[in-house]
Amino acid sequence: MGRIAGRFKRVESRRRAGRLVLGLLSDLPRKNCWSIAEWAGEASPHGMQHLLCRAVWDADAVRDDVREYVVEHLRDEAAVLVVDETGDVKKGTHTVGVQRQYTGTAGRIENSQVVVYLVYAAKRGHAAVDRELYIPRSWTCDPDRCRAAGLGEDTAFATKPELARTMIERFLDAGHHVGWVTGDEVYGGNPKLRTALEERGVGYVLAVACPAELPTGAGKFRADALARKVPKRAWQKLSAGPGVKGQRFYDWAVIDLAEATPGHHQLLIRRNRTNGELAYYRCHSTTPAPLATLVKVAGSRWRVEETFQSEKGLAGLDEHQVRRYPSWARWVTLAMLAHAFLAIVRADEHAHRPAPDDLIPLTCNEIQRLLITVAVHSDHGTAHRLAWSTWRRRHQARSQASHYRRQAASET
């Protein structure tokens, strides 16, 4: 918390932000301003709500601090930037960016927010270093709605690949170097993103759909058509990296492409060894890259799923109950900081205090449990619990009465 202390104008806000981050790391079954305020010993949720809504501090500056914190502790010359989006299912229509749209979290079209994240995936660990909320056209075409949600009236629509490009360029412009970027078909199918990476001299291994047409010396072919031309001897069994149940082995093949732009362009093909299912990746590098390197980069994309799982399960990333953009940005940024802390402690423990042979290395889940049970004491006594029970019931009674008055007024 000392790294971000200077971002707050008042000491009260700084201290409350520390309590909020500890609350995000707590074992509360549901994390929001109410539950964290009670856990932290505050008399009501007003202080936490003030921190997210009206207190003077710069969430984007804290986001930059999180990036520097992660890169400083997890620095790796072979690190990969992973771009991906995740959805948070929401109710109603007033939460910023919400609309009915597909989200992989639910696996279907739901009323949800979608956020694009940039994850720094290194050998020692991985954590999110940037975030951008996807604002659909249904919002950007309605200035009044944007203004009510805390967005500027001039908010322009940006696709998910455009948001990814903004974050990657922000990372590079901060003076950091990375050799590779990877992402799924949403990003691999966008030529502007690929061109931007090539111009910055950054290699990529981006997934593409099977109908994608790719240039070769013999003309343009669909990705699946090229896969059928690969001879049996060209396939190699390689691991995409360790998984929960061991190494993730697939068959891989690579085909050179005839792009007009400088650099080395290739199509990487992955074949599932069990069911034969194929996946395709467009690859680019400034210098020739061996197949093993391309496979390693492609395998890094799974790290983003682990990051989302940890940030949501351990740091309450998706449990915010806020509607306006400034509050959303503050909550998500502090959740990223909380998860980065766990990832960095885990990396340091693995490097400097390796576990005995009869124990698995410390995980983020176990570090969170130890932190809360050993280092943090949040039992504020019976009187505090009873006072919060009274406060909740009084607030709910006022809300109920307000709903009844509004209903009666609409009926007359």
Image: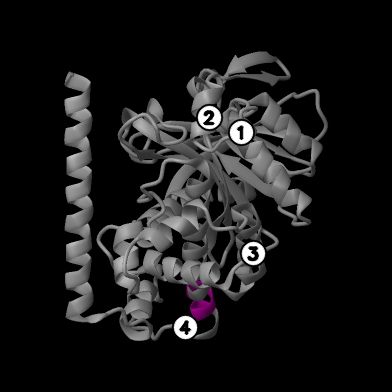
In the image, the segment drawn in magenta is 346-350
Measured in 3D between alpha carbons, the distance from the residue under mark 1 to the one under mark 4, in whole angstroms, is 49 Å
Measured in 3D between alpha carbons, the distance from the residue under mark 2 to the one under mark 3, in whole angstroms, is 26 Å
For label 1, the residue is 152
Element carrying mark 2: helix
Q: What secondary structure predominates along the stretch shown in magenta?
A: helix
Asked if the residue under mark 2 is in contact with the one under mark 1, i.e. CB atoms within 8 Å, the reply is yes
- Give residue 255's quadrant in the image: top right
Farthest top residue?
A: 219
Q: Residue at x 41, y 53 (%)?
A: 317
Measured in 3D between alpha carbons, the distance from the residue under mark 4 to the one under mark 2, in whole angstroms, is 50 Å
Front one among 247 and 400: 400
Give the residue type at disc 2: Cys
Element carrying mark 3: helix
- Give residue 213's quadrant in the image: top right
For label 3, the residue is 7
Q: Is residue 76 visible?
A: yes
Q: Is residue 241 visible?
A: no
Q: Residue at x 53, y 29 (%)?
A: 146
Q: Which numbered tag is attached to residue 134?
A: none
